[in-house]
Image (cartoon, helix red, strand yellow):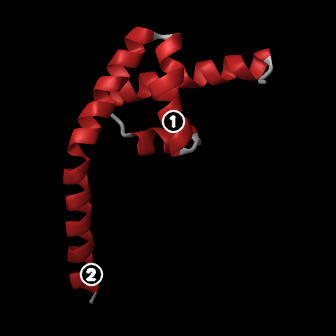
Amino acid sequence: MQDKHSYDLTLCRCVAVGRYVAETGATVRQAAKVFGISKSTAHKDLTVRLKSEDYILYQLAAAVLDKNKKERHIRGGLATREKYIMAKKHG
């Protein structure tokens, strides 16, 4: 079991990640990179821990996560397109 200090730090981090995602519209991957944590940790912070810590912020972050999930196939297609454009330039 975590001690009180690390538990408080975890809650502070999950609120900070939630605010960042809600304010910037960042993806889980982007938020994880900014905070120096894994995608799994960022996702758990946003979907589990934040819900019990700050429900209003959780709802805002969840809306962004839902939007990002609906758009991820578009981002993936653009990344693939960019990959082939770069390969054609250098190939």
Q: Which of marks 1 and 2 is nearer the N terminus?
A: 1
Q: Of helix, strand and loop, which one carries label 1?
A: helix
Q: Which mark is residue 73?
A: none
Relative horizontal placement of residue 2, taking residue 85 as reference (left or right): right
Image label count = 2
- At a point 28% along the width and 85% down the height, the residue shown is 90
- At a point 27% along the width and 81% down the height, the residue shown is 87
Q: How crowded is mark 2: few (under 14 residues within 10 Å), some or many (20 or more)?
A: few
Q: Is residue 29 above or below residue 89?
A: above
User: Whole-Å distance between the Cαs marked 1 and 2?
Assistant: 33 Å
Q: Position of residue 86 (x, y in %)?
A: 26, 76
Indicate the amino acid at tag 2. Answer: Ala
Q: In which quarter of the image is residue 77?
A: bottom left
Residue in the foreground of this view, choosing between 22 and 7: 7
Residue at the disc numbered 2: 87
Q: Is residue 35 above or below residue 62?
A: below
Residue in the foreground of this view, choosing between 86 and 6: 6
Q: Quadrant of the N terminus?
A: top right
Q: In which quarter of the image is the C terminus?
A: bottom left
Q: In this view, does 13 lie above or below 38?
A: above
Q: How crowded is mark 1: few (under 14 residues within 10 Å), some or many (20 or more)?
A: many
Q: Do the residues labelled 1 and 2 touch (CB within 8 Å)?
A: no
Residue in the foreground of this view, choosing between 41 and 23: 41
- At a point 22% along the width and 40% down the height, the residue shown is 70
Q: Which residue lies furthest to the bottom in this view?
A: 91
- At a point 23% along the width and 83% down the height, the residue shown is 89
Q: Position of residue 12 (x, y in %)?
A: 60, 19
Q: Position of residue 15 (x, y in %)?
A: 52, 19
Indicate the amino acid at tag 1. Answer: Ala
Q: Of helix, strand and loop, which one carries label 2?
A: helix
Residue at the disc numbered 1: 42
Query: Which one is closest to the eye, mark 1 or mark 2?
Result: 1
